Image: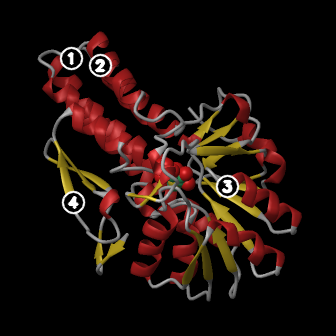
Amino acid sequence: MLIKGKNYRTIWMEGNTIQTIEQNKLPEEFEIISIDTLEDVAKSISTMIVRGAPAIGAMGAFGLAQAIQKMAAPNKQEIQNVRDFLFQTRPTAYDLQHGLDFVMAKTLSESDPHTMKQIAMESAQAYVDASAEACRKIGEYGNSLINDGDKLLTHCNAGALATVDYGTALAPMRLAHKNGKNIFIFVDETRPRLQGAKLTAFELHEEGIPYAVIADNAAGFYMARGEVDMMITGTDRVAANGDVANKIGTYEKAVVAHENGIPVYIAAPISTIDFTCPTGNDIPIEERNQNEVLDVDGHRVAHEGSTALNPAFDVTPAKYITGIITEQGIYNPGELDKIIHK
Ligand code: MRU
């Protein structure tokens, strides 16, 4: 992704140190932080220094590989313990499990400690590179859906910051813009954590893509007026039946889009599809701290003594989804069994 004219990934390794962009400080400050301990890897995920399903998967893969380097003689139990510790940091995004299990399986296919450490690092890097490449391809498939002059709606941040690079929902928009299509993006601000206003707006601004931030409550207004041609979001977990969990508020946007005849596309690498999860009802939904709702940007706005409820994700039933854009092509949510996966 371009930031101040320079190309960055969201997360990368330098030696045995993980480098990532501190997303809680954007857009005011652009800070790259170094992560050297298992505790800091876990904290970076749970406090959302790094967030977005594929980006969390990348952090899990690198975090496990980093921890394996520090083991005197890596063994199954020790690796499993680290995997389980990192796995519990955020429950909804399936990519985290995918990234952790990929590195664990590759590492455990060896028995020599030195080779295990080497394979852990190589497999984490391979996982992260493949994740970026998947998003690049999502961009190509998704771009084929976008016409010159289209106005698109997105929710939360499913951009490069939420992935290793390119983004999921934002990858097609990036490519469409690069190819000279005149597009405009409605960016839902995405309360409570404002990933739309802070992160998606930041990315679109850096890439020079025309956009406007809208209050979450305004999306229906623009859809009803016929101003939105297509809705594209990312997802944290796709169930086998095509139901999709994504940032809280996605469900109501999809229902309103459906009501107004607006196509709803979900962009996701195959690492986000949980083929073992039958339906959206089986997807674990993260509940976050109520202060995220009671406060806006760290300032208390709710009446003193109020309590709040803070589900971080909701589930959009497959019937509202026009297609799922993956690195293997665009699928009807009812035909995910056609996807080749390991
Ligand atoms: O709570 P977050 O910011 O991690 O939620 C992120 C989202 O909901 C994204 O839409 C999803 O992870 C897909 S990102 C490519």
Q: Which residue is mark 1?
A: 74
Q: Which residue is mark 3?
A: 250
Look at the image and tell me whether residue 243 can be seen.
Answer: yes
User: Helix, strand, or loop for circle 4?
Assistant: strand
Q: Disc 2, disc 1: CB below 8 Å?
A: yes
Q: CA distance from mark 2 to mark 3?
A: 36 Å
Q: CA distance from mark 2 to mark 4?
A: 28 Å
- Badge 2 or badge 1: first in the primary sequence: 1
Q: Residue at x 21, y 17 (%)?
A: 74
Residue 310 in picture, x, y percent from top left: 56, 43
Q: Which residue is mark 2?
A: 79
Q: CA distance from mark 4 to mark 1?
A: 30 Å
Look at the image and tell me whether residue 322 can be seen.
Answer: no
Q: Which residue is mark 4?
A: 32
- In depth, the one of 108 and 23 nearer the eye is 23
* Pointer 3 local density, CA inside 10 Å: few below 14, some 14–19, many at least 20: many
Identified by mark 2, the residue type is Ile
